[in-house]
Image (tube, grey):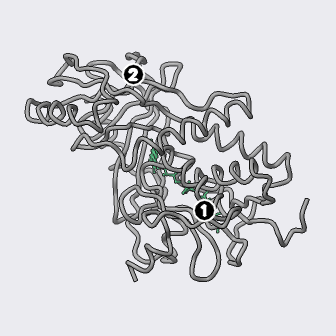
Amino acid sequence: MMAEKNRWQIIGQGLAGTCLAWHLWWRGAPFVIMDRGQGGSSRVAAGLINPITGKNFEPSWQLAPWYAEAMAFYQKIEETLGRKFWHPLPILRLAADEKEWLKILSKSKLEQVQPWIAGSQPAAGDWHHAMLIRGGGWLAVADFLNASKTFFQNAECFQLADHKQSNSRTIWCDGAAGLMTSRYGRHRCAKGEILTIRAVADESHIRVGGGGWMIPIGAGEFRVGSTYEWDVLDENPSAEGIIKLQKTAERLLGRATYEVVGHDAGIRPILRRSMPLLGEMPDGSWMLNALGSKGSLYAPGAAARLAACLCDGTLPDDEVNIARYLQLHD
Ligand SMILES: Cc1cc2nc3c(=O)[nH]c(=O)nc-3n(C[C@H](O)[C@H](O)[C@H](O)COP(=O)(O)OP(=O)(O)OC[C@H]3O[C@@H](n4cnc5c(N)ncnc54)[C@H](O)[C@@H]3O)c2cc1C
């Protein structure tokens, strides 16, 4: 192994730091990944990838190339670790009323949306109609992080440490904790809460509607999410959170009864919507952050781009370049 001073120091073992560690590993670049072993958004995330999202039924930013990179990355990880982390499942996008349905229907005909549409169908219960989306699924994020940590521990590339110093080998992948230091100026981080429930319900697809979602994760369990809160940024599950999430569960489940088996909270790292930022900082350190609500989709591609900067000396595209972002938001 190269001398310690030449190793990259990745700070944070969430989705950002873990994906970067894998890219450096594949390139044979020496690194150590340090994590303080508590908190973080990835540990609670549901890992959902929904190609066509939101009230406006729109494709995620630069969906096609980043989606392809994410799928190839998770497949390579599964081959390396001999375990399954990506669980493809169709997404049933439910419309509450005719107005919402007509909007979904018209958006579904757009050229960039059409490849992701598998067809429409009547919806059960109080829902008006439903659109089936292809390409969806969920990443078992905590399993992926834990298995990667074990791999890097065995390779002597992991340390439990709360790291504070910055130098030209430091790569900040410290999520919302990093954004809240104001290192990158004003942030828009959002607390999110999520439930794990047990229910007897259809496990053949992910249900999305009414501003919430419900993901079958096997053995009769589902993850239900998630809330957005901008004023109180802590990682504690709240009484208001569980009330909101139970309403979402009841809406998406229809008449099925359920039992709550878990309730978690985290803080999404947001600077400007869910578009990653990466590259070199003015002090010579490096960063990968701002994955927002879409870490599972964007972390693999963002990490690949940063690894190319670190190992090949390439510059990131303007849209994701932190140096450019800082110039524009000075
Ligand atoms: C409730 C909820 C549900 C979500 N659901 C989804 C979803 O379904 N799909 C999706 O794509 N995204 C989802 N997200 C968003 C997703 O969690 C984030 O995009 C992603 O996890 C961010 O990863 P990260 O590595 O940047 O940050 P983090 O996961 O927060 O990782 C940062 C790591 O750095 C460590 N750290 C911080 N400071 C230091 C330090 N000084 N020294 C050492 N270690 C440090 C932390 O302990 C942490 O482990 C959800 C988020 C929440 C809150």
Residue 202 image position (x, y, % from top left): 38, 16
Disc assigned to residue 173:
1
For residue 80, side relative to residue 198 (left or right): right
Disc 2: which residue:
205
Q: Is mark 1 within 8 Å of ligand 1?
A: yes
Amino acid type of the residue tagged 1 in the rendering: Cys
Residue type at tag 2: His
Which image quarter: residue 38? bottom right
Q: Which quarter of the rendering shows the N terminus?
A: bottom right
- The Cα atoms of the two marked residues, 1 and 2, are separated by 32 Å
As drawn, 165 above or below 262: below
Query: Does 257 appear above or below 162?
Result: above
Q: Which residue sits at x=43%, y=73%? A: 325
Circle 2: element type: loop
**Numbered badge on residue 196:** none
Outermost residue to the left:
99
- At x 21% / y 44%, what residue is drawn? 56
Q: Is residue 151 above or below residue 305?
A: above
Ligand 1 visible in quadrant = bottom right
